[in-house]
């Protein structure tokens, strides 16, 4: 059983398949993946779902189960199968889980979505992984929350608790170190862009020159597009505007003047500018090239960094500066403000100390 990537003829579009032990596509999985592609899910999302469904089908094979006859108890055994580093072997010693809680939950989300789709098209009667209950207490309450607070919402029964981890943040000095360690203006601009705007890497690599507005406003338009030839995708389906500094636009101008390839038929901002073997010069930058860049920077500077850490740093700095969550939600492009709160609100010991100092100062003023 394996995951196979393919390219559709005359379209350059990627397709993903799960092949069984006879190297034939597994039909129910292919129907679901085709559905995900039809509703506009990103290629990266479809790729991840493909690997998750391959794991599930391996579990079915090892457990000698039919996918049409799965119930909630058998699906819970899938959690144990994902965790167990030695399938079929019971150890008297404590074992480390083969996969983390977040990965397991993502696999469960994929499988639950798969069965929900199959139920909708009439292939199965469902697994019963959801229940409906009144909205639980939330940290953030919208202006009209009292209208919907009595409305039942769908929640998943199978979900394991994930430990909350703080990925950390970079300091301005570390960001400068990373930018200085870059060998090209393009890479320096990319680092500063991600740090100052909080853009997702897919949003940055999908930028076109028409999205960059210089002058009095200095703003960047994040536009969802489905036809990017480098297969990048803006996660959010809505367009938004991100205001930036004059200094960032100066980095953009320097990159265009000194390094941007001439006489090319391409309007992407980030292009391959040199280095044979990493793509033809003048073609849009791809995910794998950026991954390679960040691995080199981590090794060169000793700072463990990835593109999303710069987004996290940007959000954390705005929160510490007192930004309202609704503004931060719009700047980051989240559909739900609760996502902003759950993902980016992390209070360090230094944050607690500063807030307590403010409290003491206010108490002295009152006295």
Image (cartoon, rainbow, N blue to C red):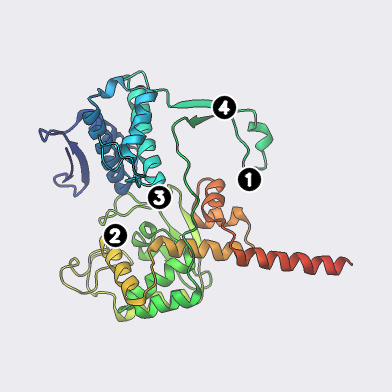
Disc 3, SS = loop
Q: Which residue is drawn at 38% across and 30% down?
A: 76
State the residue in front, 241 or 362: 362
Which badge, 3 or 2, comes first in the chain's sequence? 3
Q: Is mark 2 on a helix, strand or loop?
A: helix
Which mark, by number, is residue 287?
2
Q: Mark 4 points at which residue?
A: 133
- Front tag of 4 and 1: 4
Characterize the local packing of mark 4: few (<14), some (14-19) or many (20 or more) Cα atoms within 10 angstroms. few
Residue at image mark 3: 235
Q: Do the residues labelled 2 and 4 touch (CB within 8 Å)?
A: no
Task: Give how far apart the Cα atoms at labels 1 and 3 are.
Answer: 23 Å
What numbered label is drawn on residue 140?
1
Q: Do labels 4 and 1 touch, CB within 8 Å?
A: no
Badge nearest the viewer, 4 or 3: 4
Mark 4 falls on what kind of element? strand
Q: Distance between the residues labelled 2 and 4?
A: 40 Å
Is the residue marked by circle 2 packed among few (<14), some (14-19), or many (20+) residues within 10 Å? some
The location of residue 80, given as percent across then percent down, is 35, 35
Of marks 3 and 2, the one in the foreground: 2
Element type at mark 1: loop
Left or right: 324 as drawn, with respect to 116: right
* Picture residue at 29% right of the left edge, 54% below the top: 228
**Quadrant of the rendering where the N terminus is positioned:** top left
Please report whichever mark, 4 or 1, sits nearer to the chain's N-terminal start: 4
Asked if residue 130 is positioned above or below residue 308 in the image, the reply reads above
């Amino acid at each position: 059983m394996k995951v196979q990537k393919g390219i559709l003829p005359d379209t350059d579009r990627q397709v993903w398949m799960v092949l069984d032990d006879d190297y034939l596509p597994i039909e129910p999985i292919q129907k679901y993946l085709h559905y995900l592609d039809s509703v506009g899910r990103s290629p990266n999302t479809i790729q991840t779902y493909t690997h998750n469904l391959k794991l599930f089908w391996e579990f079915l094979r090892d457990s000698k189960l039919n996918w049409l006859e799965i119930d909630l108890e058998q699906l819970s055994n899938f959690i144990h199968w994902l965790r167990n580093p030695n399938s079929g072997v019971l150890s008297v010693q404590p074992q480390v889980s083969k996969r983390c809680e977040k990965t397991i939950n993502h696999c469960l989300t994929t499988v639950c979505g798969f069965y929900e789709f199959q139920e909708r098209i009439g292939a199965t009667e469902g697994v019963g992984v959801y229940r409906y209950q009144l909205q639980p207490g939330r940290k953030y309450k919208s202006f009209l929350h009292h209208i919907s607070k009595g409305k039942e919402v769908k929640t998943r029964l199978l979900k394991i608790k994930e430990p909350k981890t703080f990925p950390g943040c970079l300091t301005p000095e570390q960001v400068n170190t990373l930018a200085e360690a870059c060998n090209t203006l393009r890479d320096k601009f990319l680092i500063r862009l991600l740090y100052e705007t909080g853009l997702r890497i897919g949003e940055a690599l999908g930028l076109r020159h028409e999205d960059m507005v210089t002058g009095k406003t200095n703003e960047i338009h994040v536009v969802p597009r489905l036809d990017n030839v480098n297969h990048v995708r803006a996660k959010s389906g809505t367009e938004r505007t991100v205001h930036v500094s004059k200094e960032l636009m100066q980095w953009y101008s320097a990159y265009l003047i000194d390094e941007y390839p001439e006489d090319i038929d391409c309007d992407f901002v980030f292009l391959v500018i040199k280095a044979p073997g990493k793509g033809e010069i003048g073609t849009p930058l791809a995910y794998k090239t950026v991954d390679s860049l960040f691995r080199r920077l981590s090794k060169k500077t000793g700072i463990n960094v990835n593109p999303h850490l710069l987004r996290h740093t940007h959000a954390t700095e705005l929160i510490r500066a007192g930004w309202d969550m609704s503004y931060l939600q719009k700047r980051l492009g989240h559909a739900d403000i609760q996502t902003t709160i759950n993902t980016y609100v992390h209070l360090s010991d230094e944050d607690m100390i500063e807030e307590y100092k403010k409290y003491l100062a206010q108490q002295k003023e009152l006295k």
